[in-house]
Image: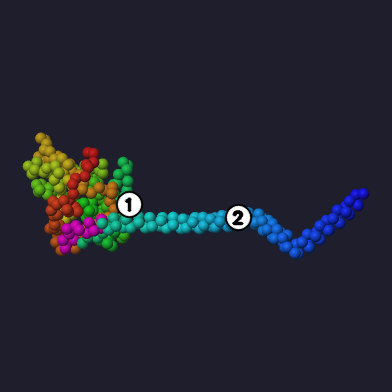
């Protein structure tokens, strides 16, 4: 029974197929329907695949672009760091050039030859202040013991001892330093002595009748034969007469900040005059002079 039904259904389907086939041969209607259905099926299947492929390609392009951007950022960062380092180095070179130009503007005469030197190191004392400095010039460059040293503002000190290529400088503030000085206006003479980096300088043996005044510039007098005349040294901080002595009690502040020394000049004598007759042209009291500037804050006495 079941077999007959299946056979009958198969025969009916065969005739239906043959009829549809014959009808399609005449009208081509089924071909058009099949084409449309196939195209729709293709659209439903391949459109999502195409969109997925485009998204994957876009993501990959973005990823590769981000990697390139990251690499470019690294290169640019390295370049910026290099340029910043170059800028800092050029800035230091410009500052050094400015200091050297100011040093070379000092009013030296033909008897003295200026030799530029750089401070290499400083010896720190018990109170963390400079007691001495070492420069990169030795006796081969004229830095023999006793050679004066100047900075932009004025006198620094003199060479204490020297090797072939380096030398130790006895600073103006050292208790062992003595300089014969003179007031630029009053012409009062005295001996300037250091009292340590944390204390004001002392000017000894200034006659109370000579009128040395606070704020007056002190220059080397040349009477000691160790320094040429007229080098700016210090400014008078206080000057007062005492009842128990014929000499004034004078305190002064150095023009040069010893803790900030970088570039200095060695004054090598090339003339033929004896030490007591060596002359150094005194600069005028002018605000434009690289040497003569306003007083700095005085150290505690």
The crowd level at tag 1 (other Cα within 10 Å; few <14, some 14-19, many 20+) is some
Q: Position of residue 100 (x, y in %)?
A: 25, 58
Residue sitting at x 25%, y 49%: 171
State the residue position of label 2: 51
Q: Position of residue 259 (x, y in %)?
A: 28, 47
Determine whether label 1 and label 2 are within 8 Å by CB. no
| Residue at mark 1 to residue at mark 2: CA–CA distance | 72 Å
Residue sitting at x 19%, y 63%: 270
Residue sitting at x 21%, y 46%: 254
Residue sitting at x 18%, y 49%: 293
Q: Secondary structure at mark 2?
A: helix
Left or right: 285 in relation to 5:
left
Q: Earlier in the sequence, mark 1 or mark 2?
A: 2
State the residue position of label 1: 121
Q: Which one is in front, 258 or 103?
A: 103
Q: Position of residue 59 (x, y in %)?
A: 56, 55
Is 180 within the magenta? no
Q: Which range of residues does the magenta coloring cover?
A: 99-112
């Amino acid at each position: 029974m079941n077999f007959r039904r299946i056979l009958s259904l198969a025969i009916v389907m065969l005739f239906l197929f043959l009829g549809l086939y014959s009808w399609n041969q005449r009208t081509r209607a089924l071909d058009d329907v099949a084409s449309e259905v196939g195209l729709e099926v293709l659209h439903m299947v391949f459109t999502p695949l195409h969109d997925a492929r485009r998204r994957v390609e876009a993501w990959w392009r973005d990823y590769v672009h981000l990697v390139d951007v990251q690499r470019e950022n690294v290169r640019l960062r390295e370049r910026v760091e290099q340029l910043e380092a170059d800028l800092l180095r050029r800035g230091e070179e410009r500052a050094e050039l400015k200091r050297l130009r100011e040093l070379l503007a000092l009013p030296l005469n033909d008897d003295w030859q200026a030799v530029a030197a750089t401070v290499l190191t400083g010896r720190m004392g018990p109170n963390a202040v400079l007691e001495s400095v070492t420069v990169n010039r030795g006796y081969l460059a004229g830095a023999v013991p006793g050679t004066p040293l100047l900075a932009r503002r004025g006198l620094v000190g003199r060479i204490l001892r020297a090797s072939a290529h380096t030398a130790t400088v006895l600073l103006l503030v050292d208790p062992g330093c003595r300089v014969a000085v003179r007031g630029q206006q009053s012409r009062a003479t005295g001996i300037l002595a250091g009292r340590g980096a944390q204390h004001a300088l002392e000017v000894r043996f200034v006659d109370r009748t000579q009128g040395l005044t606070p704020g007056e510039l002190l220059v080397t007098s040349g009477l000691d034969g160790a320094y040429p005349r007229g080098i700016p040294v210090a400014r008078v901080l206080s000057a007062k007469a005492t009842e128990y002595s014929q000499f004034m009690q004078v305190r002064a502040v150095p023009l040069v900040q010893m803790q900030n020394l970088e570039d200095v000049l060695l004054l090598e004598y090339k003339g033929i005059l004896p030490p007591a007759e060596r002359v150094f042209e005194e600069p005028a009291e002018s605000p434009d002079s690289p040497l003569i500037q306003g007083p700095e804050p005085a150290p505690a006495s």
